[in-house]
Image (cartoon, rainbow, N blue to C red):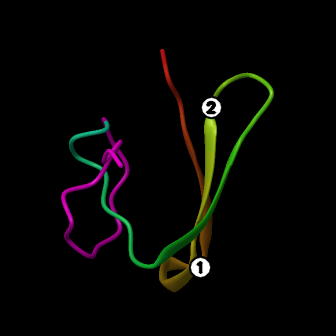
Amino acid sequence: MKTLTGKGLHGKQNGYLEQALFDGPNGVRFLKNGNLLVVDQLNHMVRIIEFK
C-alpha cells in the first residue's frame, strides 16, 4: 500500500499531492484518462487527483 496524497490529517484543502487534505475518503476509482476520482465523504465532495 502506498499513500498517493494527503498527510494522514483530516481537513479540506486542495493543492499539490503533498498539500491536499481529505476527511473521510471512502471511494476511489481510476478514470479513463488516468486521473483518480475520490469520494471525500465528510467534506461532502467528489475530488479528482490529476497525475501529470
Query: In the figure, 52 relative to 50: above or below?
Result: above
In the rendered structure, find residue 33 and report the number of the disc placed on it: none
Is-magenta flag for residue 46? no
Which residue occupies 75% across, 35% down?
31
12 versus 35 height, above or below: below
Counting from the top left corner in percent of width and height, residue 45 is at 60, 69
Residue for badge 1: 44
Looking at this view, name the residue that lies furthest to the right. Answer: 32
Element assignment for label 2: loop
Q: Main secondary structure of the magenta part?
A: loop
Q: Is residue 2 rendered magenta in the image?
A: yes
Q: Residue at x 62, y 31 (%)?
A: 35
Is the residue marked by circle 2 packed among few (<14), some (14-19), or many (20+) residues within 10 Å? Answer: some
Residue located 45% across and 79% down the image? 24
Instruction: Name the foreground residue: 28 vs 16.
Output: 28
For badge 1, the amino acid type reads His
Of the numbered discs 2 and 1, the one sitting upstream in the chain is: 2
Relative placement, left or right, of 11 versus 37 is left
> In the displayed structure, would residue 14 be above or below residue 44?
above
Q: Magenta residues, as a range?
A: 1-16
Q: Is residue 34 left or right of residue 16?
A: right
Number of numbered discs on residues: 2
State the image quarter where residue 41 is shown: bottom right
- Taking the spot 38% from the left edge, 67% from the top edge, the residue there is 22
State if disc 1 and disc 2 touch (CB < 8 Å): no
Q: Which residue is mark 2?
A: 35
Secondary structure at numbered mark 1? loop
Query: Which residue in the rendered view is the most extreme toward the front?
Result: 1
Q: Position of residue 13 (x, y in %)?
A: 33, 59
